[in-house]
Structures are given as structure tokens and as C-alpha cells.
Amino acid sequence: MGQVIRSHNDVWIRAEEESAVGSLRRTAVALAEACGFDEQDTGRVAVAVSEAASNLVKHAVEGVMLIRPHPELAAAVEVVAMDRGPGMHDFSHALRDGYSTKGTLGIGLGGIARMASGYDVHSVPGRGTVVGMCFTARGAVLPPSRVSGVTRPIGEETVCGDAFAVVGSGTSTTVMVCDGLGHGEAAALASREAVRVFLEHADRHPGFEPVSALERIHRDIARTRGGAVAVARIGAAGGPVSFAGLGNVSAWIAHPEGRQGMISVPGIAGHQGRTLRQYEYTLPEDAMVVLHSDGLSDRWDVAADPGLVARAPSVAAVTLLRDAGTRRDDACVVAVRPAA
């Protein structure tokens, strides 16, 4: 089956007080050690995360950080910092040696970028900044940075009712998103079952069509409360996108000038739905495919967010969650860059 990714129960940690810096550093260090990093590699993670967290505490508005195993490579550490702060007018200046945010460790964003194995950023003045970092052990392979997704539960819930899974083979990436009906543990159960069925179907039927996976999920999650489900297969840049959806998971082909929506049929997977259909689309060379639950508004505008579709999938997904997400529902967003 090739590469397999399934959603984690992402834990977003607030970085609003000085005490958060130590807590975030310890979380990152524990994960690096669990990934088998040696003392030197773990030290890189500790310093970079401390600096990024200090920046959030001192200068950001609603700063949060996500620390987790990298979704494309379990032996790597992924850190994403998100805020609604002032943003940066000149990011290239912030990366120069000698530039540091006042009062932090003194290494600045340029130092963070050098310590990380992979690094990307998206910043818009007046809207905020998203920084994505990846850490691997020295000499280890880097994640391909082709697909990433994030989830966030409603309000103060600890369980998210939305979930996603990804399988990859060669230049093809297939994504499934499920928005379990309602929220809480019952919704999460429906989404977890959809993930299980999707991965089982992919394992038994290599080269499957999205509509066949959707049909299987629709049939097999009937014992749960069900939900909205979408499956998309993304080929190489300039190639095809195949899509099948049931319910209100939104799917888009986003490019620098705008976006094209993909069609789902009405219904609830597991309970009601008319004849399922698969639609075919063409993927522009510079496009990104985005799937998200209705925990994000459809009103985001990629043309008004210059450079977003060129960013790493993790940075693009988190930016969309920040700008279009609502705290009145569970949320899930997945971004896929086609293979070159």
C-alpha cells in the first residue's frame, strides 16, 4: 500500500505565559527522545522550540503550538507555531544573522531555520504568522512534504469528531476525510471507523477508485452515527484528480489565482445517500488540493493570501485552520501538494 498516514488527536498548546516555554520545550524533548534522537539532536529541538515559544509568548496574539510525530515520517518531530499577531512585512530581514526578537534566546528566526531539518513560514501583516519546523536525526531522510492535515475539537473538548487518512503509492496520493455527525466521542467513533475501513479497503484493493472506497465506508459505518465523507486521489502535477464525496466535506483545487470546488452528493455516510458518483478534474501545475470539514468556512480566499499554495502542506493547512476555522464545531483540514 505504500505510505500510510492517519490523523492524530492533535493537542494545541497555548503559549500565552512564560511558564508555557518550559512546558513546550519538555514536550518536544520527550518526543525527540522517543524518536531516538541523540543528545545533540535533542538539544537542537529544545533550543529551537524554546525560541519559537518565547516569540509567541512575548509578541503573538492567541499563540499556540502543535508538537507531534511528523505525519509523513514517524521518526521525525513536527512543530507548528501559529498566531494571530502582527505578522511580518519583511520575512527575509527576520532571517538574517544578527536579527533576534528582543528578550528571547537570541538566535532569532534565522537560527531556528538552521537548527531545523526542514522549515517553512507564512506571514501576512495584520493576520499573523505560521511557522512549520521538522526535526530529524542527523543523516536521516527528510519527509517528502507532500501532504499534511490537522484537526481541532470544538470548544474545550479533548476529542475531535473529524478525522483523516492518507495512502500513497508512487506519484499518487489518496486522501479520506470524515466529519462524524455531531461532536464528542460518538462522532469520533464514526470517524475512526471510517479511517479503519478506508485503510483496510486500500490494503485489499491497490489502485482502488475513490468511489469504491466511499461505497465501502458508506456500507460499513452503519453501526455508528455516520457522517460526511470525501475521498480524493491526487496524481502528479498537471495530471488528474479523482473525487467522490457524500455530505458536506468541502474539496478544492487551489491555485494562485483562485480555486475550483469539487462536487459531493447530499447525504450521510452510513445512513442515507443516493447513487454515489466519482468526478474527474485536472490539476494545474502550481496547484494544491485542500479537503476540509464544515468546521472551516468555505469563504477563505486563496487569491487574497499570496503564496499560500506554495507553502509546505502543514503550514498551508494550519493557516487555513486559523483563518477559516470556527470554534463552534470540530475542524479538520488536509492539504496535498502533487508530486513533481
Image (cartoon, helix red, strand yellow):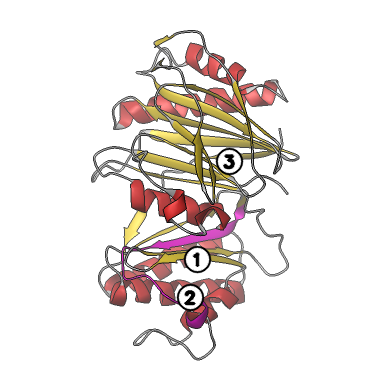
Does 52 appear above or below 127?
Answer: below
Residue at screen point 39% across, 84% down: 101
Horizontal and vertical percent position of residue 86: 32, 71
List the residue tagged with mark 1.
Answer: 121
Kind of residue indicated by mark 2:
Phe
What residue is rendered at 46% in x and 51% in y? 303
Which residue type carries mark 3? Ile
Confirm whether the magenta stretch covers residue 79. yes
Q: Which residue is mark 3?
A: 5
- Residues at discs 1 and 2 in contact (Cβ within 8 Å): yes
Residue 75 - label: none
Residue 107 inside the magenta-drawn segment? no
In the structure shown, which secondary structural element does the residue marked by tag 1 occupy? Answer: strand
Q: Residue at x 52, y 76 (%)?
A: 112
Taking depth in this image into account, of 198 and 319 the one nearest to the observer is: 319
Give residue 134's position: percent from left, percent from top: 57, 63
Q: What is the spatial separation of the Cα atoms under label 1 and label 2, in whole angstroms?
A: 9 Å
